Amino acid sequence: MPTKDQIARNEKPRPAQRGRLLALDLGARRVGVAVSDEMRVSVRALPVLPRGSWKNLVASVARLVSDFDAAAVVLGLPLRLDGTEGDAARETRRLARNLELSLEVPVHLQDERLTSRAAEETLRDEGAARAEINARVDGESAALTLRDFIASRERG
């Protein structure tokens, strides 16, 4: 829960230092998913979710939050390469607000610039075939976003 000072300054509370985090990479057709361990040392990609109706997406995410006992959800924020926000980033912010209203955990945003490209390169370097890359890239992108989020919180 936010403190009175955070509410007065309109600040979001910092995520708890322990507990699993769930990350989502919202795509047009699929949603990449990743989860951390309770100590936030390791991160792994999970199977992607289909990007269907809002109701189905919220139900799927709520189930994952419950199944993994996640302390918070992290959404990848698709900023432009120059760091500005376009339509996709504004839509992600809207979805983050709606998810936070629908879930019982905080929802945080994390810059996801170039994570899909980095995930593809990593999978290619591992020797994955094109079909495997296509199947795994969204989850791996969510995992990279989650690692970045955790690292940024450790720095301060």
Image (cartoon, helix red, strand yellow):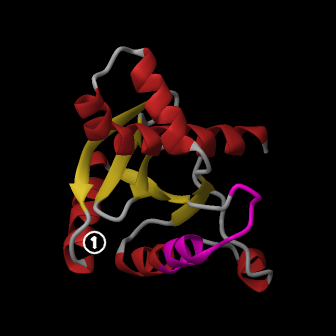
Q: Which of 138 and 70 is in front in this view?
A: 138
Residue 89 part of the magenta-drawn span: yes
Does 41 sit above or below residue 111?
A: above
> Which secondary structure lies at badge 1?
helix
Q: Position of residue 96 (x, y in %)?
A: 49, 73
The residue at 71%/81% (across/down) is 7
Q: Where is residue 39 in the image (x, y as percent from the top left)?
A: 50, 33
- Judge left or right: residue 48 versus residue 89: left
Q: Position of residue 49 (x, y in %)?
A: 24, 55
The segment highlighted magenta reads: 81-94
Q: Quadrant location of residue 36?
A: top left
> Which residue is under mark 1?
58
The residue at 74%/81% (across/down) is 10
Task: Give the residue type at disc 1.
Answer: Val
Does 75 sit above or below residue 113?
A: below
- Judge left or right: residue 144 versus residue 54: right
The residue at 22%/77% (across/down) is 53
